[in-house]
Image (spheres, rainbow, N blue to C red):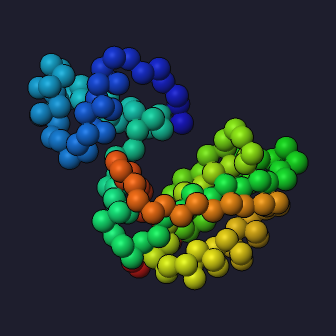
Amino acid sequence: MKKKNLDCLDKKLIRILSKDGQISMGDMAMRLSVTMPTVRSRIKNLIEAGMLKIAGLINPDNHPELLTALVGLSIQSDGKLNEEVEKLANLDQVSWVAVVTGRYDVFAEVLVSGGMAELNNLLTHIIPKVGRVIRTETFIVMKSKNKWSCMPKGLENW
């Protein structure tokens, strides 16, 4: 994956798509005062560089059957934190994982459709098998604003 520097046009394109991922190429071209082939090419290059992904997102607040939680994890990684993060990111119920500063090494957002029982299973049986998790702290999201989430692969049957 080739990284690229974003220019002003790339940034404008990303902002437009962030607000409306279904906008037509023609509308984008008109708003940006460029041609449709330019828009197509820019989008293709951004996707290939791993700098843009166009996806459908859900608002978990509008789906009461889904439980969203943030999980702080302390991990004894022995210099292999990136590998542990990759394992966590590949878990079925995980939307995203981030290495953070503070009292935890990692934060993960999880979405489950099986309520507290599924969250408990994830925290007590699945996550501990991923690596050397020393401690976790879970924050259940009671309500959020402007929070759109990718659907984790574990919710395919939802």
Residue at 45% from the left image edge and 35% from the top image edge: 51
- In this rendering, is residue 62 above or below 23? below
Q: In the picture provided, is 75 more to the left or to the right than 62?
A: right
Task: Choose top left, top right, bottom left or bottom right for residue 129.
Answer: bottom right
Q: In the picture provided, is 109 more to the left or to the right than 46?
A: right
Between 28 and 15, the residue placed more toward the observer is 15
- Residue placed furthest toward the front: 142
Asked if residue 156 shows in the view, the reply is no
Residue at 35% from the left image edge and 24% from the top image edge: 11
Residue at 34% from the left image edge and 48% from the top image edge: 146
Could you say where residue 3 lies in the image, as x and y percent from the top left?
52, 28
- Residue placed furthest toward the right: 78
Q: Quadrant of the C terminus?
A: bottom left
Between 66 and 156, the residue placed more toward the observer is 66
Could you say where residue 35 lies in the image, as x and y percent from the top left?
16, 24
Could you say where residue 151 lies in the image, as x and y percent from the top left?
42, 62
Asked if residue 27 shows in the view, the reply is yes
- In this rendering, is residue 146 above or below 64? above
Between 135 and 129, the residue placed more toward the observer is 135
